[in-house]
Image (tube, helix red, strand yellow):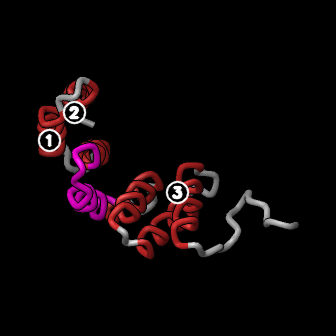
Amino acid sequence: MTLYNQSTIPSGITYEAGGRLDEAMEEYRRAIKIDPSYPNPYGAMAVIYGKKGDIDGAIEILSPLTRRYPLDFKAHTALGVAYMLKGRLEEAEDEFNLALRIKPDYEIARRNMEELRKKTHIPGPILPGQKADGL
């Protein structure tokens, strides 16, 4: 991470916490221009898109992020949530499964997978750490 990003990222976080989402987005864009390989501002931008209700914008940020960083279980989970919100349930399931393969104990991915199962009314496989009903 460059020195510039060390000041830009906290500024973006401060703007975001204060509800100044457009200014936060601009800080994250600046950080990306300086160091496009640093993944944090991409995720932060996806969160802002989500806060603004622009799920397509979040997907546009997260999809390439998961390809660039295929072991980023948090990015896969976030993309799964975005897909679930758009009704793209098979894609959401794929992303949650990827996240859980990378980090089987990641509770956020597990909870989202359970929520997806409730939406689809499909029991699905028993995830690591779960108990089967009736056993």
Left-right relation of 127 to 89: right
Whole-number angstrom distance, CA of label 2 to CA of label 1: 7 Å
* Residue 110 located within the stretch drawn in magenta: no
In-front residue for pair 119/104: 119
Q: Crowding at label 3, few (<14), some or many (≥20) Cα neighbours within 10 Å?
A: some
Which label belongs to residue 112?
3
Q: Which residues are magenta?
A: 50-65
Q: CA distance from mark 3 to mark 2?
A: 31 Å
The first of marks 3 and 1 along the sequence is 1
Could you say which is closer to the camera, residue 88 or residue 118? 118
Marks 3, 2: nearer the viewer: 3
For the point 53% across and 72% down, the residue is 120
Of marks 2 and 1, which one's residue comes earlier in the chain?
A: 2
Compared to residue 71, the image places residue 90 above or below, namely: below
Q: Earlier in the sequence, mark 3 or mark 2?
A: 2
- What is the chief secondary structure element of the magenta stretch? helix
Which numbered circle lies on residue 34?
Answer: 1
Name the secondary structure under disc 2.
helix
Q: Say which residue appears at 44% left-offset and 76% top-offset.
A: 90
Q: Amino acid at mark 3?
A: Asn
Residue at disc 1, secondary structure: helix
Question: Percent x, y for residue 55?
Answer: 26, 57
Kindly identify the amino acid type of the residue bearing the numbered disc 2.
Asn
104 to the left or right of 4 = right
Q: Quadrant of residue 60?
A: bottom left
The residue that label 2 is drawn on is 5
Q: Is residue 3 visible?
A: no
Asked which secondary structure carries label 3, the reply is helix
| The quarter of the displayed image where residue 52 is located | top left
Are the residues at dot 2 and dot 1 in contact (C-beta closer than 8 Å)?
yes
Res. 132 image quadrant: bottom right
